[in-house]
Image (spheres, grey):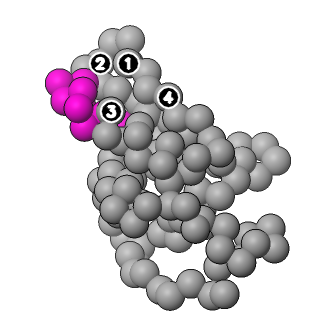
Amino acid sequence: MRCGGLRHPFAGAAVYEYAYLLGLYLGDGCLLKHPRGVYRLHVFLDSAYPVIAAECEAAMRLVMPASQASCRRHPRWNMLNLVSYSTHWPHLFPQHGPGVKHEREIASSPGKN
């Protein structure tokens, strides 16, 4: 996949961390579009499992090193919200689109060079 003219824009993305983050996105995450083509990746996790939240935050930082990742506790619910902003999240999660995730096709395809 080409992005900004780069041949391999995500060459540094670790395969295992990406697979882990993809699973979290498909299960408990979403992408929200913001102005100027920036997307916000959200993953919502139970605060009873802080190690999983730390692993998710680390995976976000490893997969998208140019972007910050943060973790915030919901003020009323037993929930953590992990967030990272980037214009590239839709490139890494081609499953993103309108409607509910469980009704979309989830398939990987070889990247184009």
Q: Earlier in the sequence, mark 3 or mark 2?
A: 3
Relative image position of residue 110 (x, y in whole percent):
50, 88
List the residue tagged with mark 2: 77
Picture disc at residue 54: 3
Looking at the image, residue 2 lies above or below residue 82: below
Mark 3 burial class by Cα count in 10 Å: few <14, some 14-19, many 20+: some
List the residue tagged with mark 4: 70
Task: Name the kind of residue labelled 2 in the image.
Answer: Trp
SS for dot 1:
strand
Q: CA distance from mark 4 to mark 1?
A: 10 Å
Q: Which marked residue is nearer to the observer: mark 3 or mark 2?
A: 3
SS for dot 4:
strand
Q: Is residue 44 left or right of residue 8?
A: left
Q: Nearer the viewer, residue 10 or 77?
A: 10
Q: CA distance from mark 1 to mark 2?
A: 8 Å
Q: Is residue 96 a member of the stretch shown in magenta?
A: no
| Tag 3–tag 2 contact (CB < 8 Å) | no
Residue in the image at 41% along x and 37% along y? 57
Q: CA distance from mark 1 to mark 3?
A: 13 Å
List the residue tagged with mark 1: 73
Task: Name the kind of residue labelled 4 in the image.
Answer: Ser
Question: Which residues are the magenta region?
Answer: 44-53
Q: Which marked residue is nearer to the observer: mark 2 or mark 4?
A: 4
Relative image position of residue 108 (x, y in whole percent):
43, 81
Residue in the image at 58% along x and 68% along y? 11
Q: Nearer the viewer, residue 16 or 102?
A: 16
